[in-house]
């Protein structure tokens, strides 16, 4: 069917329809492409930011464990320092390792391994004893059995590669070592462990290592604490050699090789080992590798995030289909409106259809008709004017079809409703295009007011601007929260004591929240009370306590409920903020507990002149966990230092006791030697007496044989009797001397032996509980 055969209604509707369809198609194509790309970019940035946060959390947790091994390595290196006051023996070291294991439930084993004869040069004396090997090498290892009880044994498999080769690596590099997950048999069942070791170095000489073993459940709990993305991302913790330490939602992958679980990503392992960040696409997924740089080690790990591309593009697809639906509806409405207007405006032309068949068929090339001045002439004149007007409309519609909105319809009169309507359409389309250009350049702040309740295009455009504005504000708010968290982490970084951390935290929070006064209370681990540890512009008053128990005041109530408390319209005399120019009272107070694993570590109280915004309260909720972790770490360092000091004091006391026992043993040895010498002299005297008796017997026999010469031998017999009496007298004196000597020696030995028995009884009582069962047995013996 030829276009000329259409009636004028169709001829007007078709160009307008083409123009509207063309404009809507262009707008849909532009907004679809830009919206889709913007959604994908935001999803990537969001996933990358979460991956960075996760990697920092893993790094902080592992560094906390490495700090323990480093501290122990520094403490043990003092054994080799002749200037150090620490002179700990093997037993105090075992006690220290056991306390470290019991105070850290996440540890599977804590142990130290020394080079042969490097600890005290007494390996031979400790051969085949507890925590030593056959040569006496000092290798104590406290580990947990299947029931979770601490068991002491000698370290195993440390010279080879069965446990990741951490010992040889630490010995070669003299740096901290974290092994990749490796299988290990514990009580007949296999589990995967990760070893973290620090070398014991003194004057650049390697003496051994201090190490901690953890199970993969530690990394599983880390993943459970991460902020899971709403895009259903798969998060994995990958070790340096490509072993999966944990996988969100897929626990069976723990301990398996990364290339076995994800064959398409096996070429990413070299980048993981170099510690580089990666973003790539694979099998319809966005894959992110965020490095975990472990302080002091040479084997970086990585956080792997696998983001389904369909989840990213689904939002853009929803927007695209919504825009297509709106455009179709608006096109239909525009066609109906234009059809109605054209039908109404061309109704007079139908009355002259017979005389203007060509014009009725769409031919607007008007031919002059010779008519008179009668009604036909006037009709002809009117018809001519209509044709000219239609020609102008067609020209403007053609310009509209090609995107030219600048030319307007010249109105023939005040009643030219068709011209007015078309001009209004032109004006509205120009405004919409202007607004869309502003949106394309990021101008979401302006408001587009619909022309009426039925202006669906204006309403949809206004809603789109509002949605984009909210999205932009949300992104800005998230950026502000992330920046605040990073700056607060910088303020808490390093090995600070509780006072420094408290001061830095409350100072930063008050400045970030623009609050004039604040205080931080820390839970005392001994009596369970909250004590003031740090403040910002806080003026102490006699009537206000700096110590609260759970349930006492707002501080204690927040600690008891473990929830944030917010108070508004505070009385003016409640608290005052004072400066050199004057003072005033804040009207709003927020009290927030600091929780770690549902345990209260402290409470923050901040007062402000203005009400706290939702962003400020959200920031407090997000950083409370990080502050609690920092406080817990500082308390752990303080406990470790106190434990070290206590161990040193106990070692000194044990050394004094051993020295006193050694002196007593020396005195006993001297007395025993003197007693042996006395016994030897007595044996000599007894031998002389025996010989004298034998001589007497011989003389007696001689007297019997010489009875006949009695008279002659009387003189010799008397002399022999005298000699016998002298010998008997000498024997009696020797017996008396022996009895006196034995009595004196018994008295002299009884005194030190009683002292030794008293000292042994005191040692066996073990009132300080610092001796092993073997030492108590020796003391009882």
Image (cartoon, helix red, strand yellow):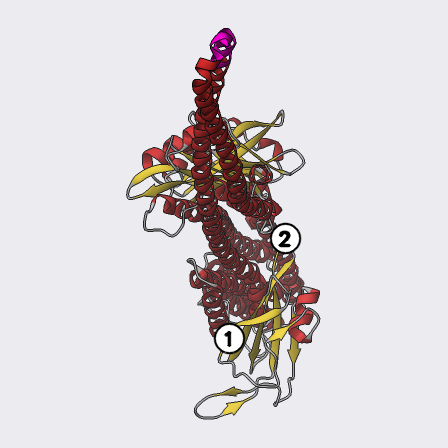
Q: Tell me which secondary structure the magenta stretch mostly adopts.
A: helix
**Can residue 283 be seen in the rendering of this structure?**
no
Circle 1 is placed at which residue position?
535
Looking at the rendered image, the disc whose residue lies closer to the viewer, 1 or 2, is 1
- Image point (65%, 80%), residue name: 568
Give the residues in magenta.
698-710
Residue 178 belongs to the span the image colors magenta:
no
Q: Which mark is residue 325?
A: 2
| Left or right of 348, for residue 731 | left
Looking at the image, is 451 positioned above or below residue 254? below
Dot 1 falls on a residue whose secondary structure is: strand
**Can residue 449 be seen in the rendering of this structure?**
yes
> Which of these two is toward me, 80 or 285?
80
> Which of these two is toward me, 9 or 63?
63
Residue 699 belongs to the span the image colors magenta:
yes
- Image point (65%, 33%), residue name: 146
Looking at the image, is 520 positioned above or below residue 305? below
Q: Quadrant of residue 559?
A: bottom right
Q: Residues within 10 Å of mark 2 (few under 14, many from 20)?
A: few
> Which of these two is toward me, 348 or 65?
65
Dot 2 falls on a residue whose secondary structure is: helix
Q: Residues within 10 Å of mark 1 (few under 14, many from 20)?
A: many
* Image coords of residue 36 (percent x, y): 51, 49
> Which of these two is toward me, 74 or 386?
74
* Image coords of residue 333 (percent x, y): 65, 59
- Image point (32%, 51%), residue name: 83
């Amino acid at each position: 069917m030829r276009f000329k055969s259409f009636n004028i209604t169709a001829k007007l509707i078709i160009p307008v329809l083409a123009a509207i369809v063309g404009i809507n198609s262009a707008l849909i194509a532009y907004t679809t492409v830009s919206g889709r790309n913007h959604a994908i970019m935001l999803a990537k940035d969001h996933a990358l930011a979460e991956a960075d946060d996760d990697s920092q959390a893993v790094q902080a947790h592992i560094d906390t464990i490495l700090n323990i091994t480093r501290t122990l390595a520094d403490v043990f290196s003092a054994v080799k320092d002749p200037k150090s006051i620490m002179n700990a023996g093997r037993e105090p070291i075992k006690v220290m390792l056991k306390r470290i294991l019991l105070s850290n439930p996440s540890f599977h084993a804590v142990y130290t391994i020394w080079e042969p004869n490097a600890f005290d040069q007494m390996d031979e004396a400790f051969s085949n004893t507890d925590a030593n090997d056959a040569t006496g090498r000092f290798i104590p290892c406290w580990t947990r059995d299947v029931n979770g009880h601490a068991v002491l044994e000698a370290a195993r498999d440390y010279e080879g590669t069965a446990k990741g080769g951490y010992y040889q690596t630490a010995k070669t590099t003299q740096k901290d070592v974290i092994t990749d997950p490796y299988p290990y048999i514990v009580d007949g069942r296999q589990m995967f462990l990760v070893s973290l070791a620090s070398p014991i170095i003194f004057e650049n000489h390697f003496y051994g290592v201090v190490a901690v073993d953890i199970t993969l459940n530690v990394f599983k709990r880390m993943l459970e604490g991460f902020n899971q993305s709403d895009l259903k991302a798969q998060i994995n913790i990958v070790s340096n050699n490509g072993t999966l330490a944990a996988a969100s939602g897929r626990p069976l992958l723990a301990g398996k090789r990364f290339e076995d679980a994800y064959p398409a990503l096996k070429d990413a392992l070299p980048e993981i080992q170099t510690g580089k960040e990666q973003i790539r696409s694979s099998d319809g997924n966005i894959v992110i590798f965020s490095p975990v740089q472990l302080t002091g080690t040479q084997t970086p790990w990585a956080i792997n995030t696998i983001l389904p591309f369909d989840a990213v593009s689904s939002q853009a697809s929803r927007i695209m289909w919504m825009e297509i639906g709106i455009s179709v509806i608006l096109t239909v409405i525009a066609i109906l409106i234009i059809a109605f207007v054209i039908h109404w405006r061309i109704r007079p032309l139908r009355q002259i259809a017979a005389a203007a068949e060509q014009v009725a068929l769409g031919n607007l090339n008007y031919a002059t008709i010779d008519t008179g001045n009668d009604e036909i002439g006037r009709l002809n004149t009117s018809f001519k004017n209509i044709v000219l007007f239609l020609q102008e409309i067609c020209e403007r519609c053609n310009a509209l079809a090609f995107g030219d909105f600048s030319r307007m319809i010249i109105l023939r009169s005040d009643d030219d409703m068709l011209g007015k309507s078309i001009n209004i359409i032109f004006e509205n389309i120009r405004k919409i295009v202007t607004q869309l250009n502003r949106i394309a350049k990021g101008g979401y702040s302006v408001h587009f007011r619909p022309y009426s309740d039925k202006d669906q295009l204006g309403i949809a455009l206004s809603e789109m601007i509002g949605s984009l504005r909210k999205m932009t504000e949300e992104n800005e708010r998230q950026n502000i929260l992330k920046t605040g968290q990073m700056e607060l982490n910088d303020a808490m970084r390093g090995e600070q004591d509780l006072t420094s951390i408290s001061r830095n935290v409350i100072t930063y929070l008050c400045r970030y929240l623009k609050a004039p006064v604040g205080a931080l209370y820390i839970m005392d681990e001994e009596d369970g009370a909250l004590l003031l540890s740090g403040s910002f512009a806080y003026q102490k008053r006699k009537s206000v306590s700096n110590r609260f128990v759970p349930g006492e005041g707002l501080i204690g109530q927040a600690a008891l409920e473990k929830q944030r408390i917010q108070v508004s319209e505070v009385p003016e005399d409640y608290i005052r903020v004072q400066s050199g120019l004057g003072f005033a009272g804040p009207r709003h107070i927020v009290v927030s507990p600091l929780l770690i694993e549902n345990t209260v570590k402290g409470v923050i109280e901040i007062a402000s002149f203005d009400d706290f915004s939702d962003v400020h309260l959200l920031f407090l909720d997000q950083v409370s966990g990080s502050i609690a972790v920092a406080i817990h770490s500082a308390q752990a360092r303080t406990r470790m230092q106190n434990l070290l000091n206590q161990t040193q004091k106990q070692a000194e006391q044990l050394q004094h006791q051993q020295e006193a026992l050694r002196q007593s043993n020396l005195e006993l040895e001297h007395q025993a030697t003197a007693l042996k010498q006395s016994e030897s002299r007595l044996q000599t005297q007894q031998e002389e007496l025996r010989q004298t008796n034998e001589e007497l017997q011989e003389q007696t026999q001689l007297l019997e044989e010489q009875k006949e010469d009695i008279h002659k031998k009387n003189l010799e017999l008397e002399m022999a009797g005298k000699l016998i009496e002298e010998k008997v007298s000498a024997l009696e004196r020797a017996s008396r001397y022996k009895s006196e000597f034995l009595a004196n020696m018994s008295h002299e030995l009884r005194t030190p032996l009683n002292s030794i028995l008293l000292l042994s009884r005191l040692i066996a009582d073990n009132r300080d509980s610092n001796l092993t069962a073997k030492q108590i047995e020796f003391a009882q013996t």
